[in-house]
Image (cartoon, rainbow, N blue to C red):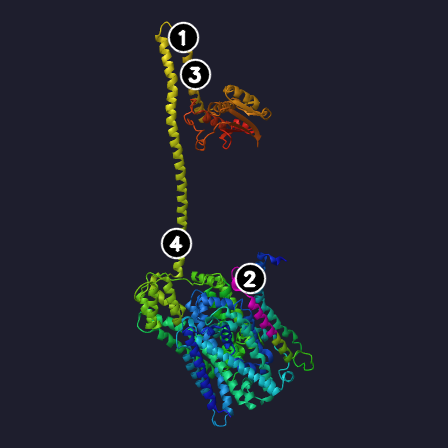
Amino acid sequence: MTAKKTPVFVQRRTYRRRRVADGARLLPVFGGILFLIPLLWEGDPAGAEAVPDGARTAWVMTYLFVVWFGLAVLSGVLARFLVAEDDGGDEEGDS
Amino acid sequence: MVTLNVLVLVCLLYVAFLFAVAFGADRAALVGRGTWLRSPIVYTLSLSIYCTAWTFYGAVGFAARSGLEFVTIYLGPTLVMIGWWWTLRKMVRVGRSQRITSIADLISSRYGKSNTLAVFVTLVAVIGLTPYIALQLQSVTLSFATFAEADPFTDAPPSQQSTAFWVAAGLAVFTILFGTRNLDANERHHGVVMAIALEAVVKLFALLAVGVFVVWGLAGGVDEILARIDSSPIARWEVPGSRWVGLTLLSAAAFMCLPRMFQVMVVESEDEDHLRMAAWAFPTYLMLMSLFVVPIAVMGLELMPEGANPDLFVLTLPLRNGQEGLAILSFLGGFSSATSMVIVAAIALSTMVSNHIVMPIWLWSTGGGAMVSGDVRSVALLARRLSIAMILFLGYCYFRLSGGGTALAAIGLISFVGVAQFLPALMGGLFWRGATRSGALAGLGVGFVLWLYCLFLPSFGASEIMPYSVMQNGPLGIGWLRPQALFGADGMDPVIHAVMWSLLLNTCTFLGVSLLTLPKPIERLQGAQFVNVFQHSQTPGSWSGGLARSEDLMIMSQRIMGASEAQAMFSKEARKQGIAGYLPEPTPDFLQMLERELSGSVGAATAHAMISQIVGRATVSVEDLMAVADETAQIMEYSSKLEAKTEEQARTARQLREANEKLTQISVQKDAFLSQISHELRTPMTSIRAFSEILRDSEGLSEEERNKYASIILEEATRLTRLLDDLLDLSVLENGQVVLNSQTGQLSDMLDRAVSAAGVQDRLRIHRRREAEKITLHTDLDRLAQVFINLISNAGKYCEAPDPALTIRPQAENGNLVVDFIDNGPGIPTDQQAMIFEKFSRIGQTKAGGAGLGLAICREIMGRLGGDITYLPGQEGAAFRVVLPLREAATVQAAQ
């Protein structure tokens, strides 16, 4: 495998680190989209008591908390792998 | 039954406990034992002051009124927190590297340390947070009232106004005791942070306890509560999209802009790496805080009588169900939420007020700044204490004015929109170097005015400050200026309406004015330091001491820090510098250290101003710096010019030296030549004279003798003529008066001619390759032959090998004829190779009496023919290379 050579291995690590940082930047966007999804379910018009299939608070609440928990876990995992070394250059170029 | 008195006692005990914790933490930090104080978990917990009484009481009320919408207030911060790598990390880094003491400090620092901006931000923050503080007062008042109602021993429960007043007064005392006991360097309050962390645990525990009690105690399990939610009035998912998105964004913005959040997140931050834990732990905390909100709201709606205040369900549900212990815990949770928020907000705001408003005014009014008598430290402390009291008083006034009956969440949102106005200036300052002070001021101004007009003033109700007619028909009947339907945006939710217009116009103004205005140099400097904080060094610019007088500095420091501390610091520094006594040299390092120490007491801007007053002209303003930079650039340019000149001079000098050497050498050679030539001339002349005299004076000479003498005379005269011919030839060649006579011929013929003319066949073997010599030439053959003859005869004359031999090696190369003449003698020493083509040059005292003109003539001839003759080093003997262009010969000739 290519990882046997030291330089390739180091570059791979740097590459990984950069992608982890990208992931960390994308996470709030991703989370924002997930939090917006319940808006799509808001199907039943006012007074449509007859539509029992419309989204219910209980169900949306479960969804939100699951997503919330998932984001916290993901954020924790990313935070473990984020390294502050790549500040230079990378920072300017990406943000 | 819990009596009101018991409750007050519990409160006081709890406060005393918190105070003890804070005191202990401060002590531990002072003696340096408190590493656990600086753990990421404490940092994360301290962030939870985001969850105030609004969360503790208001979220349930919010949920009871509008269902899941309450959660947006926690989704925004969650998104900001998980995006910490982007924004928060930068804020914290900037805060640490620039020694920022508050959000007003950050914004003013970014835009060129502008105090105008700092004052403005401070005012906006104070006004914006007033409703928020009122909210805390209201929640504590309401919770007291709830217990009072249930208290059978109190016949006349105290009025809400008086409760609120006493709560405000109590909180003010509490905050003053907590937050302004000492003036820490860098504005860090270990004790307060510790107490807040503890309160965070208490409120989370209390809310979770109530939640567990409601779900498992009242509802009877998870499935049961889900079913009840499904059949409750808030069962349907019907959140307006605009509010869902708008409130999420608003809470995210407020999370970053709230002065108290900034205080715990940036100012109190010990280590940037703590964000790593907060990145997941804080969203989890928020999630847990929100977990039981809907169940509590649903059960409250179901069990509590019609008209009960949903904001107090957290308290009333346990109370009504006889769980007094739980109710007290819940009360303490709410009390914790309110107090921690008020303490930190008041500390943050009072820091801003004292650093940016009171201290500058005080310094200005006292004229000489630190030179006048009076303890600056006590002034700073007093300013902060008064600020805290004033802030709480404002909160109380808002509570009185708004009537105390508004939903908690609605009050909180007003504050959020107010502080969110900082967002464009803050983010623009952190990420855009083009953001200017004017842009920030204009944007902030527009946003603030719109917020006042659309949200803050209408919040007092239609009749009091903003008349009903204005609300309904707009000012002066202009419909499109109606506060809650600006520019015809009718039918929008008031909060979303205000968020949209204020932030939109704020951002647009900020961007537009920034694009149009030019930043001052200091703004550009700070902008670069902020935006590129990860690339720049940590030091924010140093003092150049020298003119500062240590004694004055010491007098000032004593007034701010207290005499003993200042003396200790100064003497320590003096010892470090190796000076006895109390007055160290005002080195830049020392001044920077002093400024940092002072900034903890009076704020960075003020400390900077005070030191610059004393250090005086030695302080370099950025304008000076720029001028200096210009000057430096000029000096550098000048010096580089000088350097270039020096180099040139050195080069010229070298050339001159070389020329001189050559001249000296030539002169030496000329002398030698002259003696040589006089000798050369004299020898034949002597012979000629002597033999002429013999011929004239002697009689009886035989015919044979006469012939012999006459031929000697002739021979010598010929020699003289040849010598003179050579000299003439050379001078003609050098002056370019030579006429070339172009002919066509074979190289081999020419060499034959030259070899025979040189007359050296008897003592020199000549190696030639006939087949290589079949080259047709078109040039002045006689002149070329002269060169060849010279080279061949030189070889004959100077080759000292026992068996002298000369190799003639012709070849055609790149359109040139190249003929090498290589003998097998000792060659020419390297140091003389450069000289051999000079006139009169002769190598050593050679036996053959050449005049040293031959090679000089050869060189001149070859130059005339468009070719060259060079010495070819590195061969077995002396080697000369003759180069002659084959084709250009004609053109060169034509040019003559």
Do pointers 3 and 4 mark residues of a single chain? Answer: yes
* Amino acid at circle 2: Asp
Q: Residues within 10 Å of mark 2 (few under 14, many from 20)?
A: few
Residue projecting furthest to the top: B700
Task: State the CA–CA distance, disc 3 to disc 1.
Answer: 20 Å
Task: State the CA–CA distance, disc 1 to disc 2.
Answer: 111 Å
Q: Examine the image and state in which quarter residue A83 appears.
A: bottom right
Circles 1 and 4: CB distance less than 8 Å?
no
Which of the two marks, 1 or 2, is nearer to us in this view?
Answer: 1
> Circle 1 sits on which residue?
B705
Disc 3 is attached to a residue of which chain?
A: B
Task: State the CA–CA distance, disc 2 to disc 3.
Answer: 93 Å
Q: Which callout, 3 or 4, points at the residue further toward the start of the chain?
A: 4
Magenta run includes residue A54: no
> Circle 3 sits on which residue?
B718
Task: State the CA–CA distance, disc 4 to disc 2.
Answer: 36 Å
**Considering the numbered disc 1 on the image, is that residue within a helix, a strand or a loop?**
helix
**Considering the numbered disc 4 on the image, is that residue within a helix, a strand or a loop?**
helix
Question: Residue B760: where, in percent of width, then height?
Answer: 50, 20
In-image side of A40 versus B677 (left or right): right
Do pointers 4 and 2 mark residues of a single chain? Answer: no
> Circle 4 sits on which residue?
B631
Question: Residue B166: where, in percent of width, then height?
Answer: 44, 86
Which of the two marks, 2 or 3, is nearer to us in this view?
Answer: 3
Q: Which callout, 1 or 4, points at the residue further toward the start of the chain?
A: 4
Instruction: Write the start and end of the magenta stretch as one range.
Output: A67-89
Do pointers 2 and 3 mark residues of a single chain? Answer: no
> Circle 2 sits on which residue?
A94
